[in-house]
Image (cartoon, grey):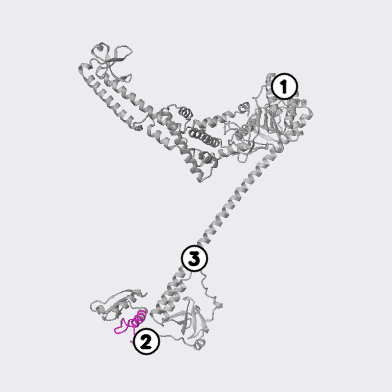
Amino acid sequence: MDSKILSTLEFHKITNKLVHHAATSLGKNVSGQLAPVSDLEDVKLMLQTTDEAYKADRLKGNAPFGGVVDISASLHRARIGGTLNPAELLDIAATARGARRVKKHIDNLHEDDPIPLLFGLTEQLSEHKPLEDAIFDCIDDNAEVMDSASPELASIRRELRSGESRIREKLEQMIRSSSVQKMLQDSIITLRNDRYVIPVKQEYRSHFGGIVHDQSGSGATLFIEPEAIVSMNNKLRETKAAELREIEKILQKLTARAAEHVEDLLYNQELLGRLDFAYAKARLAHEMKATLPRMNDRGFLKIKRGRHPLIDPEKVVPLDVELGNQFTAIIVTGPNTGGKTVSLKTVGLLSLMAMSGLFVPAEEGSQLCVFDSIYADIGDEQSIEQSLSTFSSHMTNIIRILKSMTSKSLVLLDELGAGTDPAEGSALAIAILEHIHKLDSRIIATTHYSELKAYAYNRKGVINASMEFDVATLSPTYRLLVGVPGRSNAFAIAERLGLSQAIIDHARGEVSEEDQRVENMIASLEEDRLSAESERNTAEMMRREMEAQRKRHEAELERFEEQRDKMLQKAQEEAHEAVAKARREADQIIADLRRLALEEGASVKEHKLIEAKRRLEEAAPELATKKKRPAVGGAKKPAKIGAGDEVMVYSLNQKGIVVEIGASDATVQLGIMKMKVALDDLELIKPVAQLNKQQPKQTASLKRSKEDSLRMELDLRGANLEEAIIEVDRFLDESYLGGLGQVYIIHGMGTGVLRAGIQQYLRKHSLVKTYRLGKYGEGGAGVTVAELK
């Protein structure tokens, strides 16, 4: 891409913004060298990389590039045998560690949400942890070689510290002496040429032996190394020289280890720069609120609400433009300061950004084309005193464009034909446009010449456009209107500013009839456009309202269905629970009936069957529909019910035998119980005549040998356990129905088998609350006292 075009469209300002977002010097170098690419597949690949970095930055923030620096110079010096200093080695270790951290960061992201291109870059990063550890073990954060770098260095530095301590002690003894203090300028110990000295007054120079290393500016103070410590200082300097030799050995060893991985480290550095560059593009997209454009190589572009990235977002007017489908050329006419030049630059700059792998500040769904080149002749607005040199400059540039352009180029021409005679300029502009149009290049041109409006009307594939101008406020709106040619608005502006109506009418008379018809046609088109736009806005508003209402209805329907599903699920769960409860209760009732049958032999008393049936009925799920009592007109008439008839008692849901009939009620035998029931609560099942015809059921029973009167005690002495259990069960039932609260069961002392069996039975009996052995006076251990519920 021609550097002049990049400069004209101010692409360097975009790269400067990109450099600012790079986290490392490596990324800044790559960002600064960014240039558009003319291959569609390469552009798509670059945009996909930006998209992955955009997603990664949104999910987890920037990659950890901390510590990564440009180490190429140090690595090249290590490769040729030079020795690196501690700071350079520290940079190598920090960069190697940064590469490892970036690799881990992106690998973790890729596992959660695939980013194949970035992952592919980090897969090529090599890890050098042993080298990192070796350098960090020897050099601290201040780029100083540590004592632990080698045993020899640790020993040398211990000797250094010991020697320095001895010299200081010797000098401190001297300066604390009263005879010496008067000869000193200050009672301090200092260093000159890495040797310990004391400041001595000039007049006492002869009183000190040793070596003078320095003097003050005034000459009044001499810095003398006393003779007593000369040998100690010499020894110290020898030890320091040994320290430097040992440090040099350590640095050479570390440099040699780094030199073994020079190629890998250099490639790591290149990969880190590309990764940082991808993240910089992502952060620039966040800053510009830019989106991923769809790319093609068919010469088609469709920008939706595109914004010039270098204009304040609060002030920029979005641009909507389409080129390359129904028409390949747009001719923009209209007055100056309307935004024509900005529109040209916006189209050109957004195209360059997309071809460089950058997101563009436009709405989702915008499409841009990969051109083989973009050409532009864009200058500042000219004054009315245009010179030939200006025209020559524009023509020179246009001639260069015409020689280089192809059918896959985008050409942007600002103020085409300006700077010369209007008649010749308009004719030249039409000829240039026709030449470019025949080559099938994509072109957007701006002009003042009204002749080009007619050219755009008469030429297939060419369309007029203009920048909207608000006559009411005498100011442009900076909106590009494709399909509507521009008006000069000179008469309207002059009239609004107060120019005499007579002068304006005279001016209109000077305009040719054809030009007047064109202006009237444009005015009519403008009026129709405004009307259509108003209607479109109204329709769009209604559409949005309908869409919002539809979404509300869908949300309400969704909530209703959700609530319905929850209610159905809850009802189903309750039904399941009720059925499960009923089954458990039924199983328990059946188990009780079986137990009663086993305990009582062949005889199970009627009232126990009634009780079991009642429990079974109560165990039915509550969700089941209850049997309704028939209406008064549908029931059997009470007059037909007589003594001995079998009836259904609705309130108890039990069958019974009528014992006695009254005026409004009847006495009904329900098992062993008798109770009075209202006649309208009864329904005849079988009359007494049918009951007499049935054969009585054969039942086995035990007859009590004792009298039938209700007593509080039961004597079971001499009975076996099976007989005793039957008698105890009958005794407890009668006592409970008789309202007794406590009974006595006499089983005697004996072997204790009868007592243990009876007490075990009482423990499980449903009518027994508690039981105990008799107390003194109640029969003692030969009697069990049972308390009933």
Q: What's the mark number on residue 420?
A: 1
| Type of amino acid at the residue the image marks with label 2 | Lys
Spatial CA span between label 2 and label 1 = 141 Å
Label 3, secondary structure: give it. Answer: helix
Q: Could you tell me residue 627's position as x and y percent?
A: 52, 73
Spatial CA span between label 3 and label 1 = 94 Å
Left or right, 19 with respect to 143, comes to right
Query: Is residue 340 placed above or below 749 in the rendered structure?
Result: above
Dots 2, 1 in contact, CB < 8 A = no
> How busy is the neighbourhood of tag 3: few (under 14 within 10 Å), some, or many (20 plus)?
some
| Type of amino acid at the residue the image marks with label 3 | His
Q: Could you tell me residue 500's position as x and y percent?
A: 71, 25
Figure quadrant of the C terminus: bottom left
Location of residue 231 by image quarter? top left
Query: Is residue 267 placed above or below 545 in the rendered structure?
Result: above
Left or right, 98 with respect to 528, comes to left
Q: 604 or 355, which is in the foreground?
A: 355
Label 1, secondary structure: give it. Answer: loop
- How many numbered dots are placed on residues in this image? 3
Asked if the stretch drawn in magenta spans residue 97, the answer is no
Magenta stretch? Answer: 706-733
Q: What's the mark number on residue 576?
A: 3
Residue indicated by mark 2? 703
Residue at the outermost right position: 513
Asked if the stretch drawn in magenta spans residue 724, the answer is yes
Q: Could you tell me residue 243's position as x and y percent?
A: 34, 26
Location of residue 282 by image quarter? top right
Please tell me which of labels 2 and 1 falls first in the chain: 1
Look at the image and tell me whether residue 692 can be seen.
yes
Q: 647 or 22, which is in the foreground?
A: 22
| Type of amino acid at the residue the image marks with label 1 | Thr
Label 2, secondary structure: give it. Answer: loop
